[in-house]
């Protein structure tokens, strides 16, 4: 990787992605071979926003490499409640760890924090900005199921606030991927992301109806409406529940369609879909382990 920190999917070239995913495949095939790779090294977990998968999988990934973790704990239990700045917090923590994983509600927080530390800092989600490690495990899952070239992917739901979408869409510009974005008008991809995809030469179309493109898709990536990012609860209510799939929706899909979701889901995928051959979202979440092991091993 060109830089020590992983802040945005914009840093990831095709070669970087392939290198991490290849290593993740090696790890998945023989995890025992990596059991002591990072013995004696420590990863700091700094989560200023709720997390289950990202935090636990980084924690497990580091331990499965033979390393250890220290956890800042919740914001409420830390010195942040005393008014400490993010810059000071990460400067202190870099003295305790060999790398830092940071999640924060403000867009740009990881980029800013990285300027204050010398150890590798990984962005585990910055507000509605980026979530590049989710993207790596998403790409791993897509690669396992379809390969990463000559694919048609539909991304549906909250494209405005969904950081996993912003990172994935950019990373896919490294590959021969046709991207269809499905959302209500009010949750379209932000202008800056559309511009960026255009500049990167991405093959992009936008839709308000899934039916228009569902039969063409190899992958359908469903996302949660990011309730916590809506300035106004009424705006949330107006769109909640609109973009939901169930077994009946999927009757129009190809048999090969892979349904993905970064999780947590609320009600955008009916539980009955879990029983179909399309569902890959739990497998996707589990892929977070080898992929984050591979990433940590690369950065450290
Ligand atoms: C996502 C996130 O935090 O952005 N969760 C995750 O890391 N898998 C998606 C979401 O919260 O909807």
Image (spheres, grey):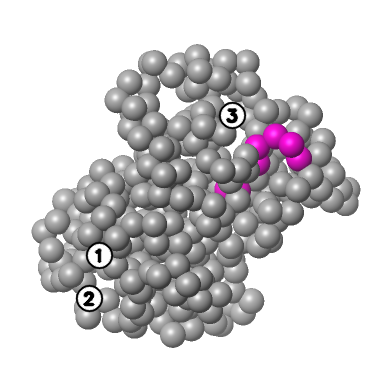
| Ligand 1 has an atom within 8 Å of the beta carbon of the residue at disc 3 | no
Q: Earlier in the sequence, mark 1 or mark 2?
A: 1
Q: Which mark is residue 152?
A: 1
Residue 33 appears left or right of 236: left
Instruction: Give residue 69's position: percent from left, percent from top.
Output: 62, 27
Give how far apart the Cα atoms at labels 1 and 2 are: 10 Å
Q: Which residue is mark 2?
A: 213
Q: Which residues are magenta?
A: 117-124
Q: Residues within 10 Å of mark 3 (few under 14, many from 20)?
A: few
Q: Residue at x 37, y 21 (%)?
A: 31
Q: Residue at x 60, y 43 (%)?
A: 3
In front of the other: 143 or 101: 143
Residue 285 appears left or right of 99: left
Give how far apart the Cα atoms at labels 3 and 1 are: 34 Å
Q: Are marks 3 and 1 in contact (CB under 8 Å)?
A: no
In front of the other: 10 or 54: 10
Does dot 1 land on a helix, a strand or a loop? strand
Of badges 1 and 2, nearer the viewer stands: 1
Q: Are marks 1 and 2 in contact (CB under 8 Å)?
A: yes
- Identify whether 200 is placed above or below 64: below
Give how far apart the Cα atoms at labels 2 and 3 are: 42 Å
Q: Is residue 29 magenta?
A: no
Can residue 263 be seen here? The reply is no
Of badges 2 and 3, nearer the viewer stands: 3
């Amino acid at each position: 990787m060109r830089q020590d920190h992983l802040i945005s999917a914009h840093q990831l070239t095709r070669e970087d992605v392939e290198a991490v995913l290849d290593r993740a495949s090696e790890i998945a095939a023989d995890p025992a071979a990596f059991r002591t790779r990072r013995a004696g090294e420590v990863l700091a977990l700094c989560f200023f926003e709720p997390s289950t998968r990202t935090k636990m999988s980084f924690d497990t990934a580091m331990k499965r490499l033979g390393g250890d973790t220290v956890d800042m704990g919740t914001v409420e239990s830390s010195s942040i409640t005393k008014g400490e700045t993010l810059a000071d917090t990460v400067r202190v923590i870099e003295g305790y760890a060999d790398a830092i994983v940071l999640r924060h509600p403000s867009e740009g927080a990881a980029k800013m924090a990285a300027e204050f530390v010398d150890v590798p800092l990984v962005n585990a989600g910055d507000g509605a900005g980026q979530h590049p490690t989710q993207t790596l495990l998403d790409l791993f899952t897509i690669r396992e199921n379809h390969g990463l070239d000559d694919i048609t992917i539909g991304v549906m739901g909250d494209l405005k606030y969904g950081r996993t979408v912003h990172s994935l869409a950019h990373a896919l510009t490294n590959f021969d991927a046709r991207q269809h974005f499905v959302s209500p008008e009010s949750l379209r991809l932000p202008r800056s992301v559309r511009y960026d995809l255009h500049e990167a030469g991405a093959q992009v179309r936008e839709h308000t109806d899934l039916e228009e493109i569902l039969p063409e898709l190899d992958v359908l990536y469903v996302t949660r409406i990011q309730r916590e990012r809506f300035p106004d609860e009424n705006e949330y209510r107006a769109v909640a529940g609109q973009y939901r799939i169930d077994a009946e929706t999927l009757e129009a899909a190809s048999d090969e369609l892979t349904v993905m979701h970064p999780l947590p889901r609320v009600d955008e995928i009916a539980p009955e879909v879990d029983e179909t051959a399309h569902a890959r979202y739990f497998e996707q979440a589990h892929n977070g382990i080898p992929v984050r092991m591979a990433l940590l091993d690369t950065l450290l």
